[in-house]
Amino acid sequence: MGHRLAESSSLYLRSHAENPVDWYPWGAEAFAEARRRDVPVFVSIGYAACHWCHVMARESFADPALAETLNERFVAIKVDREEHPDVDDTYMAATQAMTGQGGWPMSVFTLPDARVFHAGTYFPPRRVGQVPSFAEVLDAVHAAWTERRAEVETSAGKIAESLGIQRRQQAGLATMVHTQDDDGVPGAHATMEPAELDGLVAAALAVLSEQEDLVHGGFGSAPKFPPSPLLGFLLEESAWDPGSVAAGMALRTLETLGRSALFDQVEGGFARYATDLAWALPHFEKMLCDNAQLIGHYARLSVHPAADATQRARAERQARLSLDWLTERMLLPDSGLLASSLDADTVDAHGRHAEGAAYLFSDAELLDAAGAAGLGEEQGQQLVALNRGVPADEQAITQGAPLDITAQTPRTLHFDEPLTRAQTQLWEQVAPELRRRRALRDQPARDEKVVAAWNAQAISSMATAAALWDDSALLGRAEALAEQLWRTHVTLEPASDAGDDTSDDTSDDASDDVGRARVRRISYAGVPAAELGGLADHAHLAVACFQLGSAGADAAWVRRGAAVLRQILQNFVRRTDGEIQLLESPDTTGLLAAAQQGPLFATPLDGPEPSSVAALAQALQMAEALELLGAEDLRPGLILQHVKLAASKAPTVIGASLLVARRAGRRSPALRFLAGTAEDLAQVRRAGALHGVPVEPVAVEAVGTETPLRLSVCLNSVGTMICLPPVGSVDQALAALDG
């Protein structure tokens, strides 16, 4: 029955190929079939690592009776949200608007023209309280379609209109109506003045201080996600002012996450989110998008002036362990790129699913592993006493039920307090034995889909860490990963070619600085998908290229970043009557435009990942700092107007934008290394990576053995364009910027 999915490159779609449901992949064919049959469309959206997606698949989509109902009354579409984030984003907005909540699996019912009229998330096989069963939902939707068609179509029209208005309003937060100042110079006053930014940042920090969970770390209530985009801003803000309240929030959050069950204390890497306030019970899927950000944050913490020596050492250990996890578990041998996720579940030889089973250890197992690692009985008992983990019983944890924990109860690895140096040494002695034992267990499946945006974020963090640690081997790994991503996902086209998609030029010679670079979002086994990537894929790759150049990789990366940025400005930015509009994706089928009565504009609010608007602003700001933007090009401040509105109202969702606004507010500086030793250059790059100031590509002849340091700060925003007189220390250069 699932023949249309059987040959899909998506692991998530292939996992449903044996369902009795007659699934279609996302596309125009499915909606055309719905029009031919005059039936509504059921759109089920999820991803390979999603625990509850597996649950609903077993309970409902594998059920012959429910499948028969779906096949008879609907056209059913299965969507991998990681392949189609624009589809997910559009229908998630509808689901949240209609139900007040969202999540995966997402279950959406639409007209044959893709407009939504009913939506939800996971539906159980039997009614639970006020939550209807999936069969009841199918019956109710069918009844509405057959008995109240006009009402359904009217409702769908109103929902689409509302979604379009909401999208335009959110997108409009980021941009100004007019793009020219009184003299007609584009973007001349796009940068916010330092005094204005100081007030906005102070307001944001005041709100964040009120929202911080001082007991358990982080922000908000359960379920809790790592506030990764916000942490980047807090770390950079406190690098400039170690006494700022931003420092305390960044350190408390990262320290809490690092000792919690969210962090894999055995192998490294972070789970996606926790179901409880204390981060003791994660949902165990490990996503590249989360780890790509957090690795960079822990690398910054490892050299941060607000952290003490013990905190720095812990942070470096967590960053390096996670980098090793990337190489050992996520690096794909056939393509040299990073996979998108590890599943939350393991599946045994009998097909039984168990969430988190690979990661849990009982006290008895810990004690036995300690003995096998050469520790004494007393030392083993110390390790057992340190662990405050919980069983993988989400219902009991979230409802506060008493836990019956014995020495044989498998539970998460979670520490209530940061480990001392002596405790860390004990843990590091037993960790290899725990890794050995874990390797003998059933392992979570790996989704070998490669996502361009996520690989690019990993490259940025690796390059940043390499600069912070003066680690040439790590920089080489980052550059090798970037080279594979470029060769697999990027197609160059001449600047004069406005729309031809037939070019296969992926060469890495001097042509990289000519024309535009198209980025494909997805690849499998080294073969890119046909669809062009979205704004996030292009923007994050441009940032990664600039970050590589700043960290000391080949200067060609800066030219490549500029080529990607030209593609963005050509295909994702519209200027109409002085108004700027940013597109999230090409939406070549037009289905999403129908679903929300208008283009899929990019919105500026962060989720677990930085918003694509913030990613573009960062790419523009780095390009501005490296003097790559022309006089007519878009400037970062022009798409950061939401910072003025949201800083004092919702700072948790604009962390990435706050970071870029601060950089632009310093007049987009870059560090120009004029002369000095290799040690001087390493110090300059470390300071640049920590403070968010790019380092211009350095000429070989500038590096000597006994040459005194000569360092200049160049201010490159519109209306400034000046290099300050050279100074002889990094501290002097930073002081000039801080003032």
Image: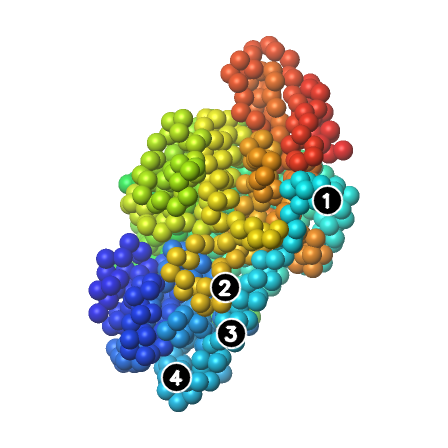
Other-residue count near label 2 (Cα within 10 Å), few / some / many at <14 / 14–19 / ≥20:
some
Give the residue at mark 3. 159
Residue at mark 2: 598
**Horizontal and vertical percent position of residue 2:** 24, 66
Eyeballing the image, is 364 above or below 418? below
Mark toward the viewer: 1 or 3: 1
Q: Which-is-in-front pick, marks 4 and 1?
A: 1
32 sits to left or right of 580: left
Separation of marks 2 and 3 at Cα, in angstroms: 13 Å
The residue identified by callout 4 is: 145
Instruction: From the viewer's perspective, tell me whether residue 632 is left or right of residue 95.
Output: right
- Name the residue rendered at 51%, 16% in the picture: 700
Residue drawn 60% across the image and 21% down it: 673
**Can residue 548 be seen at all in this image of the molecule?**
no
Q: Residue at 40% of width from left, 75% of height from top?
A: 111
Q: Residue at x 62, y 27 (%)?
A: 671
Judge the density around disc 3: few (<14), some (14-19), many (≥20) Cα neighbours within 10 Å: many
Q: Earlier in the sequence, mark 2 or mark 3?
A: 3
Quarter of the image that includes the C terminus: top right
Most foreground residue, 642 or 738 = 642
Instruction: Determine the secondary structure under disc 1.
Output: loop
- Would residue 681 be found to the left or right of residue 333 on screen? right
Q: Earlier in the sequence, mark 4 or mark 2?
A: 4
Q: Amino acid at mark 3?
A: Ile
Figure quadrant of residue 22: bottom left
Q: x and y percent of residue 639 in the render?
A: 61, 49
Quarter placement of the N terminus: bottom left
Identify residue for label 1.
182
Residue type, numbered disc 2: Gly
